[in-house]
Image (cartoon, rainbow, N blue to C red):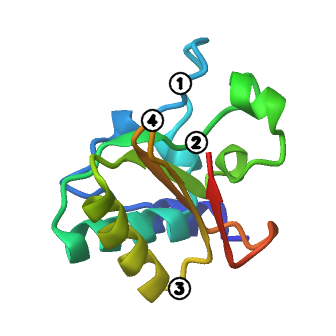
Amino acid sequence: MVHSSKKQTLNKKHPNFPEHEFACKCGTGCGTGFAQMQPEALETLYKVRDLTGIPMVITSAYRCPKHPESIRRPNSAHTRGHAIDFRVRNSAQAFAFMKVLIELGVTRLGWNQKLEFFHFDTDTTLPQNVLFPY
């Protein structure tokens, strides 16, 4: 666990990702998001964006305890700030993202082709070496 003051130092902003994209979408106005993200997840996101050169729109990041998905899946990596979902427009983009994520050592990936989003997380407490469909 990273000490909170050190964590704030590590949670650097990236010019391609405004903080509001990390906001919890629970619908209660909880005000959580970027500050709850784990540095490893943010650093991975920033590297993926820089290495692929593909614009990314975050569709889900941190989820507070009141978020409907947190209630359904309380052990989700999203509830601890380790997970990020982002829009993927086609299979070529999905392949590019997956290739870079694997090269970066990420071992938890997911893709929803129908809803056009890709998931990765850096939560080492959950099963590793998995690719799951949504």
Tell me the residue at 74%/73% (across/down): 124
Give how far apart the Cα atoms at labels 1 and 2 are: 9 Å
Residue 79: x, y in percent? 71, 44
24, 10: nearer the viewer: 24
Does 89 sit left or right of 30 as displayed?
Answer: left
Disc 4 vs disc 2: Cβ atoms closer than 8 Å?
Answer: no
Side (left or right) of 42 relative to 54: right
Disc sitting over residue 105 in the figure = 3
Q: Nearer the viewer, mark 3 or mark 2?
A: 3
Pointer 1 local density, CA inside 10 Å: few below 14, some 14–19, many at least 20: many
> Of label 4 and label 3, which has the lower sequence position?
3
Q: Is residue 110 above or below residue 48?
A: above
Secondary structure beneath dot 4 equals loop
Is tag 3's residue or tag 1's residue first in the polypeptide sequence?
Answer: 1
User: Residue 76 at what x, y percent from top left?
Assistant: 75, 48
Residue positioned 53% across, 24% down in the render:
25
90 or 39, which is in the foreground?
A: 90
**Earlier residue among tags 4 and 2:** 2
Q: Amino acid at mark 2?
A: Tyr
Residue 25's label in the rendered image is 1
Q: Quadrant of residue 64?
A: top right
Q: Secondary structure at mark 3?
A: loop
The tag on residue 11 is none
Q: At numbered mark 2, what does the secondary structure look like: helix, strand or loop?
A: loop
The residue labelled by disc 2 is 62
> Which amino acid does the dot numbered 4 rest on?
Leu
The earlier-in-sequence mark between 3 and 2 is 2
